[in-house]
Amino acid sequence: MIYVLFEQPMLNLMVVFYQITSNLGVLIILLTLFIKAVMVPFMIPTYKNMKKQKEIKPEIDKLKSKYKDDKKKLAEAQMELFKQHGINPTSGCLSQIVMIFALIGLYQVVQKVSVLQNLTELNNGIYFEFLKFTQSDLLQKNLFFFNMSEIDSTYILPILAGIFTLISSVMMLPELTEAEKAAKKASTDPEDIAYSMQQQMAILAPAMTFFVCISLPSALSLYIFVSSVFAVFQQYYMLGNWGGLVQYISLIKKYLKK
């Protein structure tokens, strides 16, 4: 099902981009940006909820203080507050699932093309005969000094992918002062525990990205890197701020002033 609904359309879209450029690296950049742009509407409900929850944070903090000894009433009061402000915590879940499967399809297509071995198998997924690849087709797999079908021995793409994954992950964290962070770490509240886990994942995700990329063809590292860069700008545009990155930006500014 994933192949028919997601991977095969991605493959045919890739062939269209192949008509524009015969370079695998440029093709991946264009294809990734196009798919990510198409996926933006699916992310809008999630970002809208995040923005609204940030706006009503003072009210949520008051409720937490008022019902700190009654978790049930706190949950009820929060849901009522969400309802008043038109926040649906579950909205966007289905759209995010669709987006994940679409990106899996894109990943599979990039992987197949970057290590192309069976031309017949690839052509079987192409809708129209005139778009199918022939033995005479030459797909240039070099982008600058990167060979898209080989592992990046310079580690440049894995490092860049890791850095932008880190930026994107930290941006998703709420803006908190050092005192608030310390309080959350010491708290046993489920929401605070969830924040601590999110903070740990913000550090773990880029490390995992780097180690995964150093074992993948450069084409896939490029895809992950471009996706991460797009995510950073998308989050800034949707949320209107740098999120949890603000504190680190302030620290850098203070350091540069010294």
Image (cartoon, rainbow, N blue to C red):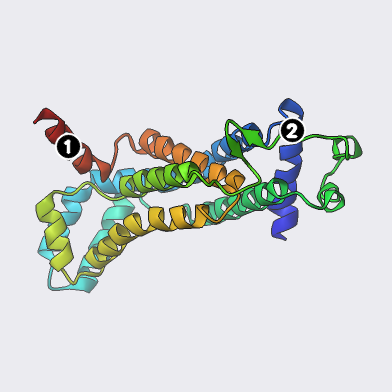
Apparent side of residue 220 relative to residue 208 in the rendered image (left or right): right
Q: Position of residue 139 (x, y in %)?
A: 75, 36
- The numbered dot on residue 229 is none
Question: Which residue is more in the foreground, 184 or 93?
Answer: 184
Q: Position of residue 118 (x, y in %)?
A: 82, 52
Among the 4 quarters of the image, the one containing residue 60: bottom left
Question: Neighbour class for label 1 at 10 Å: few (<14), some, many (≥20)?
Answer: few
Q: Hey, which residue is sitting farthest front in the picture?
A: 153
Q: Position of residue 214 (x, y in %)?
A: 51, 53
Indicate whether 116 appears above or below 184: above
Residue at x 23%, y 62% (from the top left corner): 77
Residue at x 18%, y 72% (from the top left corner): 188
Query: Which type of secondary structure does the marked residue at label 1 adopt?
Result: helix
- What residue type is disc 1 on? Ser
Quadrant where the image shows the N terminus:
bottom right
Residue at numbered disc 1: 250
Apparent side of residue 42 relative to residue 47 in the rendered image (left or right): right
Quadrant where the image shows the C terminus:
top left
Apparent side of residue 60 relative to residue 90 in the rendered image (left or right): left
Q: Position of residue 217 (x, y in %)?
A: 60, 49
Residue at numbered disc 2: 18
Question: Neighbour class for label 2 at 10 Å: few (<14), some, many (≥20)?
Answer: some
Asked whether residue 160 is in view, the answer is yes
Residue at x 33%, y 54% (from the top left corner): 83
Q: Hey, which residue is sitting farthest top in the picture?
A: 20
Asked whether residue 88 is in view, the answer is no
- What residue type is disc 2 on? Tyr
Among the 4 quarters of the image, the one containing residue 247: top left
Q: Earlier in the sequence, mark 2 or mark 1?
A: 2
